[in-house]
């Protein structure tokens, strides 16, 4: 990995897997959001993302995401992930599209 945006997204997934919502949002702009692709905003603002992640981590304490593939084009990073809620439990694939402003993530959109 040599692209700083790719390194940031991989670091964010490591923090997500460690259930470190505070560390995760440190890589985001204050006005960042997480949303469904071309759809509804799920978590708005850095504090909304933090609160939403903490609630999800409480509900799914063994939740993990594994990066299957990574793509970088300009200021956008796309991660293809395999997510599991618990060992032996529900799994699903997701494409996460990270849009950057400078060196911070400003929007994450999910295709599931």
Image (spheres, rainbow, N blue to C red):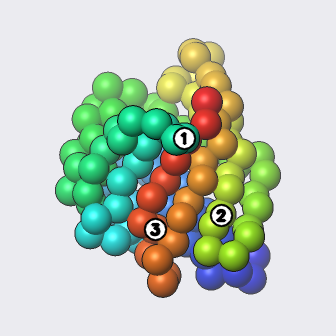
- Mark earlier in primary sequence (2, 1): 1
Q: CA distance from mark 2 to mark 3?
A: 10 Å
Q: Is residue 105 left or right of residue 42?
A: right
Q: Is residue 52 left or right of residue 40?
A: left
Q: Is residue 2 above or below residue 107?
A: below
In the depicted view, which residue is nearer to us: 73 or 12? 73
Q: Is residue 97 above or below residue 59?
A: below
Mark 2 lies on a secondary structure that is strand
* Residue at x 51%, y 26% (from the top left corner): 85
Query: How many residues crowd mark 3 within 10 Å: few (<14), some (14–19), many (20+)?
Result: many
Which quarter of the image is occupied by the N terminus? bottom right
Q: Quadrant of residue 98?
A: bottom right
Please identify, in this view, whether the residue under mark 2 or under mark 1 is nearer the observer: 1
- Mark earlier in primary sequence (2, 3): 2
Q: Is residue 11 left or right of residue 105?
A: right
Q: Which residue is mark 1?
A: 37
Q: Is residue 72 above or below residue 21?
A: below
Q: Quadrant of residue 4?
A: bottom right
In the depicted view, which residue is nearer to us: 109 or 20? 109
Q: Which residue is mark 2?
A: 77
Mark 1 lies on a secondary structure that is loop
Mark 3 lies on a secondary structure that is strand
Q: Is residue 59 above or below residue 54?
A: above
Q: Which mark is residue 105?
A: 3
| Residue 74 place in picture, x, y as percent | 69, 76
- Mark earlier in primary sequence (3, 1): 1
């Amino acid at each position: 990995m040599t692209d700083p945006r790719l390194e940031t997204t991989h670091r964010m997934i490591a923090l997500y897997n460690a259930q470190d919502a505070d560390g995760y949002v440190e890589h985001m702009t204050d006005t960042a959001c997480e949303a469904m692709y071309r759809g509804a905003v799920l978590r708005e603002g850095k504090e909304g993302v933090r609160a939403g992640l903490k609630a999800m981590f409480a509900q799914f304490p063994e939740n993990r995401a594994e990066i299957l593939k990574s793509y970088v084009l300009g200021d956008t990073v796309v991660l293809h992930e395999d997510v599991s809620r618990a060992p032996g439990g529900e799994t699903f694939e997701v494409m996460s599209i990270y849009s950057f402003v400078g060196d911070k993530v400003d929007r994450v959109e999910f295709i599931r």
